[in-house]
Amino acid sequence: MLLARQNDLEYPRLGLVIGKKSIKLAVERNRVKRQIRESFRHHQDKLGGWDIVIIARKGMAEQQNVELARQFGKLWKRLTNNQPAASSQPTTAKGNDA
Protein backbone atom coordinates (compact mmCIF):
# COMPACT_ATOMS: atom_id res chain seq x y z
CA MET A 1 0.00 0.00 0.00
CA LEU A 2 1.24 3.47 -0.81
CA LEU A 3 0.21 6.60 1.09
CA ALA A 4 1.19 9.98 -0.31
CA ARG A 5 0.75 13.60 0.62
CA GLN A 6 2.22 16.64 -1.07
CA ASN A 7 4.87 18.51 0.90
CA ASP A 8 6.19 22.05 0.61
CA LEU A 9 9.60 20.85 -0.54
CA GLU A 10 10.95 20.50 -4.05
CA TYR A 11 11.90 16.86 -3.56
CA PRO A 12 10.09 13.68 -2.50
CA ARG A 13 10.66 11.82 0.75
CA LEU A 14 10.20 8.09 1.31
CA GLY A 15 9.15 6.19 4.42
CA LEU A 16 8.97 2.40 4.70
CA VAL A 17 6.84 0.36 7.09
CA ILE A 18 7.88 -3.29 6.80
CA GLY A 19 7.12 -5.25 9.93
CA LYS A 20 7.91 -8.79 11.02
CA LYS A 21 4.25 -9.72 10.72
CA SER A 22 4.26 -8.85 7.02
CA ILE A 23 7.62 -10.33 6.05
CA LYS A 24 9.03 -12.84 8.54
CA LEU A 25 12.70 -13.13 7.58
CA ALA A 26 15.06 -10.17 8.02
CA VAL A 27 16.84 -11.12 4.79
CA GLU A 28 13.58 -10.78 2.86
CA ARG A 29 12.60 -7.52 4.60
CA ASN A 30 15.99 -6.04 3.70
CA ARG A 31 15.74 -7.24 0.09
CA VAL A 32 12.30 -5.65 -0.30
CA LYS A 33 13.53 -2.39 1.25
CA ARG A 34 16.52 -2.31 -1.10
CA GLN A 35 14.29 -2.85 -4.12
CA ILE A 36 11.84 -0.13 -3.07
CA ARG A 37 14.63 2.36 -2.38
CA GLU A 38 16.30 1.62 -5.71
CA SER A 39 13.05 2.06 -7.60
CA PHE A 40 12.38 5.31 -5.73
CA ARG A 41 15.89 6.56 -6.52
CA HIS A 42 15.31 6.00 -10.25
CA HIS A 43 11.97 7.85 -10.23
CA GLN A 44 12.48 10.59 -7.62
CA ASP A 45 13.31 13.29 -10.18
CA LYS A 46 9.81 12.88 -11.68
CA LEU A 47 7.94 12.72 -8.37
CA GLY A 48 8.32 16.33 -7.20
CA GLY A 49 7.30 17.29 -3.67
CA TRP A 50 5.64 14.22 -2.16
CA ASP A 51 5.87 12.54 1.22
CA ILE A 52 5.44 8.84 0.42
CA VAL A 53 4.94 5.98 2.87
CA ILE A 54 5.04 2.37 1.68
CA ILE A 55 3.33 -0.15 3.93
CA ALA A 56 4.34 -3.74 3.20
CA ARG A 57 1.70 -6.44 2.95
CA LYS A 58 1.95 -10.19 3.25
CA GLY A 59 3.07 -11.86 0.05
CA MET A 60 5.52 -9.13 -0.93
CA ALA A 61 8.51 -11.30 -0.03
CA GLU A 62 7.44 -14.01 -2.49
CA GLN A 63 7.74 -11.64 -5.45
CA GLN A 64 10.92 -11.57 -7.51
CA ASN A 65 13.02 -8.40 -7.74
CA VAL A 66 11.92 -7.75 -11.31
CA GLU A 67 8.26 -7.99 -10.34
CA LEU A 68 8.75 -5.60 -7.39
CA ALA A 69 10.51 -3.10 -9.65
CA ARG A 70 7.70 -3.33 -12.22
CA GLN A 71 4.96 -2.82 -9.62
CA PHE A 72 6.65 0.13 -7.97
CA GLY A 73 7.39 1.65 -11.36
CA LYS A 74 3.65 1.59 -12.02
CA LEU A 75 2.93 3.15 -8.62
CA TRP A 76 5.42 5.98 -9.17
CA LYS A 77 3.94 6.62 -12.62
CA ARG A 78 0.40 6.71 -11.21
CA LEU A 79 1.57 9.10 -8.50
CA THR A 80 3.19 11.50 -10.98
CA ASN A 81 0.00 11.52 -13.06
CA ASN A 82 -2.12 12.14 -9.95
CA GLN A 83 -0.44 15.32 -8.69
CA PRO A 84 -3.16 17.63 -7.31
CA ALA A 85 -2.84 21.38 -7.66
CA ALA A 86 -2.76 22.56 -4.03
CA SER A 87 -4.44 19.82 -2.03
CA SER A 88 -2.83 18.36 1.06
CA GLN A 89 -5.26 15.44 1.38
CA PRO A 90 -3.55 12.04 1.57
CA THR A 91 -3.64 9.93 -1.55
CA THR A 92 -3.84 6.16 -1.32
CA ALA A 93 -2.78 3.90 -4.16
CA LYS A 94 -3.04 0.16 -3.77
CA GLY A 95 -0.94 -2.16 -5.85
CA ASN A 96 -0.55 -5.90 -5.77
CA ASP A 97 0.55 -6.35 -2.15
CA ALA A 98 2.57 -3.16 -2.36
Image (cartoon, helix red, strand yellow):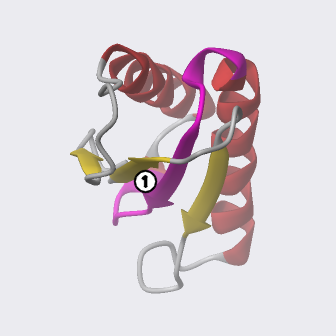
96 with respect to 49 (left or right): left
Q: Nearer the viewer, residue 16 or 91?
A: 91
The image quadrant where one finds the N terminus is bottom left
Q: Where residue 30 appears, x then y in whole percent?
A: 74, 62
Residue type marked 1: Met
Question: Circle 1 sits on which residue?
Answer: 60
Question: In the structure shown, which secondary structural element does the residue marked by tag 1 occupy?
Answer: helix
Q: What is the quadrant of residue 33 in the picture?
A: bottom right
Q: Where residue 80 appears, x then y in whole percent?
A: 43, 19
Magenta includes 57? yes
Magenta includes 38? no
84 with respect to 35 (left or right): left
Name, please, the residue furthest toward the bottom. 21
Q: Where residue 14 appears, x then y in whole percent?
A: 64, 52
Tell me if residue 58 comes above or below residue 5 in the rendering. below
Tell me if residue 42 comes above or below residue 54 in the rendering. above
Q: Which residues are magenta?
A: 45-60
